[in-house]
Amino acid sequence: MNMNTTSFSQKIKQFLIIFLPIFTTQIALSAMSFFDTNMSGKFSPADLAGVAIGTSLWMPVQTGLSGILMGITPVVSHLLGSRRHDQIGHSVIQALYLGIAVGLVVLGAGALLLSPVLNGMPLEPHVANVAFYFLCALAFGIMPLFGYTVLRSFMDALGQTRITMLITLVSLPVNILLNYVLIFGRWGFPQLGGVGAGVATACTYWLIFLISLFFVHRIEPFAQYGIFRQWSSVSFRKWKELLLIGVPIGFATFFETSIFAAVTLLMSRFDTVTIAAHQAALNFASTLYMLPVSICMALTILVGFENGAGRLKDAKQYSVLGIGGAVALSLITAVILLLFGEQIAGVYSNEREVITLTQHFLIYAIFFQISDAIATPTQGALRGYKDVNPALIITFVAYWIIGLPTGYITATYTSLGAFGYWIGLIAGLAVGAATLLWRLFRVQQQAALRPSSD
């Protein structure tokens, strides 16, 4: 795909060509989590709470480690922009090797730590049981998920985001169908409740990995890079290159997603209704988050391509386009949350108490999703410049040094209770957004002073 542009209107068109399929893919992936949560909630509040706890433990690990593997995106974009096509296949196969290594580490850590972590939480026995077996089922999908992450990042970096969109859209109805038969025990399948959602998700991860494998090996333009035709041995030098970019991306992502997980785990001291309402509101907010995260991924590809080609003015224009668009969209979603909060809450539960509490949480979600609209696309632009280490420090300080302590103090020592944690989230995300934006301005100023060469 030719990603060269000469005018701002062409950039808008190119941005939409890259962004819209990524957004559709992210919505479909997030919809899997939505249906896990929603269908478990329709089974019972305890199963909803169990899946909520299991998801809160898994999501930071998954997004953080997937972030490490997504380091292949700016690497491939840079190689493409600087016309070093011969190095792309080797980079991708090394990223796959790295994904296998990361998967083995996760499985080992999970085997050792899962039971002690759940036993240390004040959960009702059935909730803890659902969380444990939900994660055990999910473990069977970890390897294919990490493999898919690498292959998807490679395909996206080539500008072929529509292909990954189609793969994910094909898998979504399969995931919903498996959820239906396994959670509720339809058509002769066992009634597994929330645990069935874990089994369904693991099966879906295998499906998207195998389809991606076929596309990369057999379909153009991916097949021309011959990724599986010449198997090379593990190159620790290439791993180092991928990790130097991927680890800061992964940890920055981990710090952001894990603060939401930490809040959910801290919520375990409240009753099951509060946990369920918090999780429902957070799940919808996570769906809205797919807008800025998709813009972030599009900016990594486009800014990385222009930066690799030495076209710094074009890279800066894409940054303005992406961040400005994200803020505008966040204001629209804020209006939707204000107008339709009760209807949104009703999607997650049939119980009036849960619906009312969820609606209150959604008001707080308005504020932190506006900060997300600035912080997340800004990180995408910084990754395009291969400037990843400062974002790691900024996200850690903003979310864990400012956000979480503020939330804990507000929740524990004021009458706000559970809502206090959301006040902390808003404070941390706002600080992160402002600081990351300042960092992007600095990087663009420094880039402008250097000779425009790769």
Image: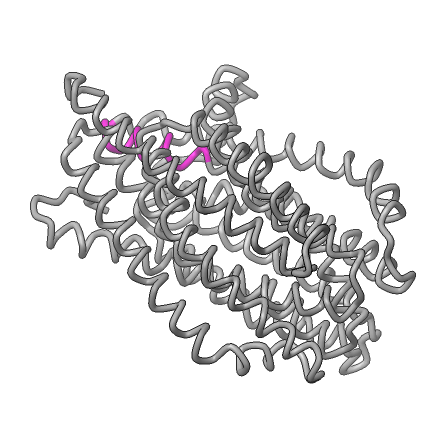
Which quadrant of the figure has residue 338? bottom left
| Residue occupying the point 32% across, 34% down | 438
- Which x, y percent locates residue 373? 38, 53
- Which x, y percent locates residue 273? 75, 71
| Residue occupying the point 32% across, 26% down | 86
**Count of numbered badges drawn on the protein:** 0
- Which x, y percent locates residue 393? 49, 28
Residue 74 painted magenta: yes
214, above or below 147, in the image: below
- Residue lying farthest front? 414
Magenta stretch, residue numbers: 71-83
Residue 153 painted magenta: no
| Residue occupying the point 29% across, 53% down | 18
280, above or below 155, in the image: below
Image colouring: one colour
197, above or below 352, in the image: above
The majority secondary structure of the magenta stretch comes to: helix
Which quadrant of the figure has residue 105? top right
| Residue occupying the point 50% across, 47% down | 427
